[in-house]
């Protein structure tokens, strides 16, 4: 995975109005992998530089006070400007020049980061690194270690008797104490995932929601649901528990060993690779993917096998792994939706641990995105679409015909064709399926 780094090339002397900010004035370079986000063009002299000169105190204070939401809250469909502001590192810089970069949880020990360019007629510098085309995947441990080191460095620079040191030290010690207590750590992570400050006494008591379902189920739904949706969602899950456990089963052992995550790739590539492993282990018929799936999954693919026609917005399917099989209860209103969600849930069941319940959700976390890419590749394999594609690509009518033949969502076939490099005639490229975190 790529690394996010905030490099500090020495402390500088500065005549700032705030003496505490002046003590943390530094020459700073921010990078993601090989991309230098602070590379800039001077609006005055015209020269370029890889560094900016800024105080690190405002950034350190923001990170210490918003540690859990910043690093554990994933992007949710419907998230607005408040979410983006909460996850932008430039927002707390109080007008000091800083690249427009955002960080949020990617799930499964990962973080996502993305950056954009913004114009400001009054800025002293113009950042010239091109914006990211989509979120980059980062290792959570590396980013957390880097931020901890930055916080420690800022604290070392401050006057221990000053108000800035006292405020920052108290906020950071609170986080450090939580990290050292397993129960408190678990609660803070849950609060962070929901964008809630775990130290705010006015925040809702999340144990009320978490106690109703298993930890694995709560982890899944809290990646997709907003905090006000949690109570009705957990209550619904409790009501349907019996139906869920009696749902049709799929033999996930027949898929072979679940492949390791290629953490240097996009989530959709992870799902596609898993689908290739599945097809190889189950001896897929490349000329008839629909027939092959019906042979492997059987009647669970049928529209009447869907357990629910309505469910909370954060629930697409329920999965209960039992030894080598997984019970799959889907939420579907059409045959195409049923097939897609069965395949999505099959991925989650295959990746799961025996005895564990999980939920397929519309979350943008890496695992859930990979499950949807897995489903699309099973239903409309890239190799099959390339074989079917006319010389000059597909029209929308031809894609609808194929979607009907394969009993697959139209949008999934469009995406599969696009990713397979097949031209789309008279059609706009599909909208990006990555979270707009910045």
Image (spheres, helix red, strand yellow):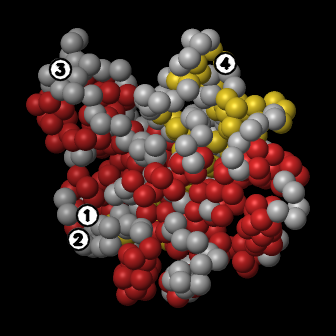
| First-in-chain label (3 vs 2) | 2
Tell me if residue 198 comes above or below residue 90 in the rendering. below
3 vs 1, front mark: 3
| First-in-chain label (4 vs 2) | 4
- Mark 2 touches mark 1? (CB < 8 Å): yes
- Mark 3 touches mark 1? (CB < 8 Å): no
From the viewer's perspective, tell me whether residue 323 is left or right of residue 157. left
| First-in-chain label (3 vs 4) | 4
Residue that mark 3 sits on = 425
- In this view, the residue in front, 323 or 69, is 69
Q: Callout 4: helix, strand or loop? A: strand
- In this view, the residue in front, 185 or 148, is 148
Distance between mark 3 and mark 1 Cα atoms: 31 Å
Residue that mark 2 sits on = 309
Distance between mark 1 and mark 4 Cα atoms: 54 Å
Badge 1 crowding class, 10 Å Cα cut-off, few under 14, some 14 to 19, many 20 or more, is: many
Distance between mark 4 and mark 2 Cα atoms: 57 Å
Looking at the picture, how far across and down is residue 195, in whole percent? 52, 66
Residue that mark 4 sits on = 49
Looking at the picture, how far across and down is residue 419, in whole percent? 38, 28
Residue drawn at 49 percent across, 63 percent down = 223
Distance between mark 3 and mark 2 Cα atoms: 35 Å
Figure quadrant of residue 388: top left
1 vs 4, front mark: 4
Distance between mark 3 and mark 4 Cα atoms: 44 Å
Residue that mark 1 sits on = 332
């Amino acid at each position: 995975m790529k690394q996010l780094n905030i490099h500090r090339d020495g402390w500088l002397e500065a005549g700032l109005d705030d003496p505490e900010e002046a003590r943390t004035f530094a020459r700073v370079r921010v990078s993601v992998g090989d991309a230098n986000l602070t590379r800039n063009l001077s609006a005055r002299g015209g020269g370029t530089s890889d560094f900016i000169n800024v105080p690190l105190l405002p950034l350190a204070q923001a990170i210490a006070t918003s540690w859990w939401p910043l690093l554990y809250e994933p992007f949710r469909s419907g998230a607005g400007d408040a979410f983006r502001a909460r996850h932008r590192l430039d927002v707390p810089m109080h007008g000091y020049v800083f690249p427009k970069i955002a960080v949020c949880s990617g799930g499964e020990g990962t973080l996502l980061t993305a950056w954009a360019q913004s114009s400001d007629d009054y800025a002293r510098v113009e950042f010239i690194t091109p914006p990211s085309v989509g979120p980059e995947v980062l290792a959570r441990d590396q980013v957390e270690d880097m931020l901890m080191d930055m916080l420690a460095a800022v604290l070392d620079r401050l006057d221990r008797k000053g108000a800035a040191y006292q405020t920052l030290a108290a906020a950071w010690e609170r986080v450090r104490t939580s990290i050292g207590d397993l129960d408190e750590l678990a609660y803070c992570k849950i609060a962070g995932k929901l964008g809630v400050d775990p130290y705010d006494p006015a925040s809702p008591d999340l144990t009320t929601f978490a106690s109703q379902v298993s930890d694995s189920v709560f982890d899944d739904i809290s990646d997709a649901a907003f905090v006000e949706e949690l109570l009705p969602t957990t209550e619904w899950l409790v009501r349907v528990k019996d139906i869920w456990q009696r749902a049709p089963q799929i033999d996930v052992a027949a898929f072979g060993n679940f492949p390791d995550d290629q953490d240097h790739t996009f989530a959709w590539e992870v799902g596609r690779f898993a689908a290739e492993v599945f097809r190889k282990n189950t001896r897929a018929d490349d000329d008839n993917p629909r027939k092959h799936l019906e042979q492997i999954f059987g009647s669970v693919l049928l529209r009447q096998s869907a357990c629910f026609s309505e469910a909370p917005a954060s629930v697409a399917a329920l999965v209960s792994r039992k030894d080598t099989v997984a019970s799959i209860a889907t939420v579907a209103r059409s045959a195409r939706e049923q097939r897609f969600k069965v395949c999505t849930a099959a991925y989650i069941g295959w990746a799961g641990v025996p005895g564990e319940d999980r939920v397929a959700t519309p979350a943008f976390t890496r695992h859930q995105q990979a499950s949807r890419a897995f489903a699309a590749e099973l239903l409309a394999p890239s190799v099959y679409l390339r074989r079917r594609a006319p010389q000059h690509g597909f029209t929308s009518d031809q894609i609808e015909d194929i979607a009907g033949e394969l009993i697959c969502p139209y949008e999934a076939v469009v995406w599969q064709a696009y990713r397979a490099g097949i031209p789309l005639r008279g059609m706009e490229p599909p909208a990006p399926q990555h979270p707009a975190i910045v």
